């Protein structure tokens, strides 16, 4: 018997992470394997994509610090931060297109195009000249932002084709690729930029590293569900998109997500530079972002283990509140020990918030073939 979608409002905050069914649109209409070699290979591949995309752009604090003090020193830090902001904008805003394209059955072309563009833009960044802000903005801000926006949402969604009962857990595992990437990339980039290798070859080595991982990721990932839409008219597509915006629970969720993500990435950009300005030793400051992101890896996985028991909203709301409290507390933090504690705590709770976004949207989606488009809309807003 079909469950009425309106019933979600009566249990959304208190019930476990259950799946609502609706006749032919039910998630149960698909024989989801919930495991197997292909499924876990897809998880590994998606993890690598998130590692190379979200994990890379979220270590922009390393670039920010280097640009402010070295190759873009003639420009203000607020102007330089626009490069990272545009990257994050691309990461979220293009998900609506790549997610919809995946729902149409174009997963492989989307992933290959995005992967190629990501590596190309990194090589272009290595060729930029000193004090030429527009070159860095074009290659790293716009180009790399588009690339990561193309691949990120499909990587999160693809595991939904293979898992149902453990969907929150595997989404958390895939999402942890961002935190692991934000742990590994800053350490490597700092060693490259401030060592004998230097900035240009450091970025190139990073590009080759990501190239190898993305080749492996594309080989591992597979999709198993048919596309939701075939060749449809414009009017049919309008109906398809319009029903997203008549779902009150979904609209409330993306409105809250919009407010939350206005500030959730702020410490990621400025933590390293802030630590140096407060007298923290440079060698220690270089590892503050890595420390934040290492804690974020645990934050992305741990809540997804218990979310099926306590509910996705009962998990994400306390973590979001903790992030807000910590950002206000950051104003008073000026000594090295406090900065390290802040990095660990904020990394954990912000990682939890980001990792629970996918399960939250999946919870509010009746049909698995709509998850990509719905997640893309949420990330745009």
Image: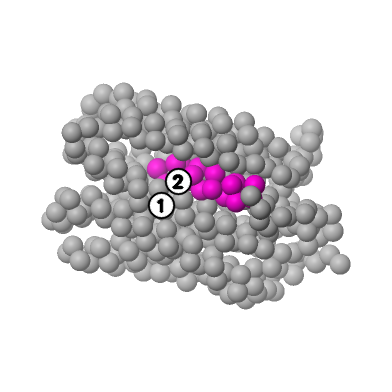
In the image, residue 285 above or below residue 204? below
Q: Is residue 359 left or right of residue 199?
A: right
The answer to which quarter of the image holds residue 13 is bottom right
* Within-10-Å neighbours for mark 2: few <14, some 14–19, many 20+: many
Which numbered disc, 1 or 2, marks the residue that appears first in the sequence? 2
The answer to which quarter of the image holds residue 167 is bottom right
The answer to which quarter of the image holds residue 94 is top right
Q: Secondary structure at mark 1?
A: helix
Q: Is residue 308 left or right of residue 197?
A: right
Asked if the magenta segment contains residue 160, the reply would be no
Do labels 1 and 2 touch, CB within 8 Å? yes
User: How many marks on residues?
Assistant: 2
The answer to whether residue 129 shows anywhere in this view is: yes
Q: Secondary structure at mark 2?
A: helix
Dominant SS type (magenta): helix
In magenta, the rendered stretch is 38-57
The answer to whether residue 353 shows anywhere in this view is: no
Residue 177 in picture, x, y percent from top left: 46, 50
Residue at image mark 2: 51
Q: Is residue 93 left or right of residue 108?
A: left
In the image, residue 330 above or below residue 29? below
Locate the N terminus and report the quarter of the image it occupies: bottom right
Residue at image mark 1: 180
Residue at 59% in and 47% down: 41
């Amino acid at each position: 018997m079909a469950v009425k979608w309106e019933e979600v409002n009566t249990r959304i905050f208190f019930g476990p992470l259950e799946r609502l069914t609706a006749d032919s649109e039910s998630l149960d209409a698909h024989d989801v394997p919930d495991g197997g070699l292909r499924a876990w290979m897809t998880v590994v591949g998606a993890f690598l994509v998130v590692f190379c995309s979200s994990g890379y752009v979220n270590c922009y604090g390393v670039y920010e610090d280097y640009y402010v003090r070295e190759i873009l020193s003639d420009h203000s830090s607020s102007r330089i931060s626009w490069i990272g902001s545009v990257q994050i904008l691309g990461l979220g805003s293009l998900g609506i297109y790549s997610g919809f394209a995946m729902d149409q059955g174009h997963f492989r072309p989307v992933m290959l195009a995005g992967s190629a563009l990501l590596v190309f833009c990194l090589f272009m960044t290595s060729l930029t000249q000193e004090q030429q802000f527009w070159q860095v903005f074009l290659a790293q801000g716009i180009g790399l932002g588009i690339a990561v926006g193309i691949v990120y949402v499909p990587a999160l969604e693809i595991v939904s084709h293979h898992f149902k009962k453990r969907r929150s857990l595997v989404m958390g595992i895939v999402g942890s690729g961002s935190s692991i990437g934000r742990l590994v990339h800053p350490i490597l980039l700092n060693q490259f930029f401030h060592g004998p290798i230097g900035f240009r070859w450091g970025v190139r080595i990073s590009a080759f590293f990501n190239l190898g991982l993305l080749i492996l990721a594309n080989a591992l990932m597979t999709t198993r569900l048919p596309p939701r839409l075939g060749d449809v008219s414009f009017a049919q597509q309008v109906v398809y998109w319009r029903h997203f915006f008549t779902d009150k629970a979904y609209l409330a969720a993306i409105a809250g997500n919009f407010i939350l993500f206005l500030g959730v990435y702020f410490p990621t950009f400025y933590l390293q530079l802030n630590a140096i300005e407060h007298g923290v030793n440079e060698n220690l400051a270089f590892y503050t972002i890595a420390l934040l992101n290492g804690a974020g890896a645990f934050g992305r996985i741990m809540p997804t283990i218990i979310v099926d028991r306590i509910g996705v909203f009962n998990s994400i709301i306390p973590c979001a509140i903790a992030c807000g409290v910590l950002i206000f507390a950051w104003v008073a933090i000026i000594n090295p020990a406090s900065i390290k504690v802040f990095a660990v705590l904020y990394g954990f709770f912000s990682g939890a918030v980001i990792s629970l976004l996918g399960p939250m949207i999946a919870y509010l989606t009746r049909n698995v073939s709509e998850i990509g488009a719905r997640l893309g809309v949420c990330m745009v807003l």
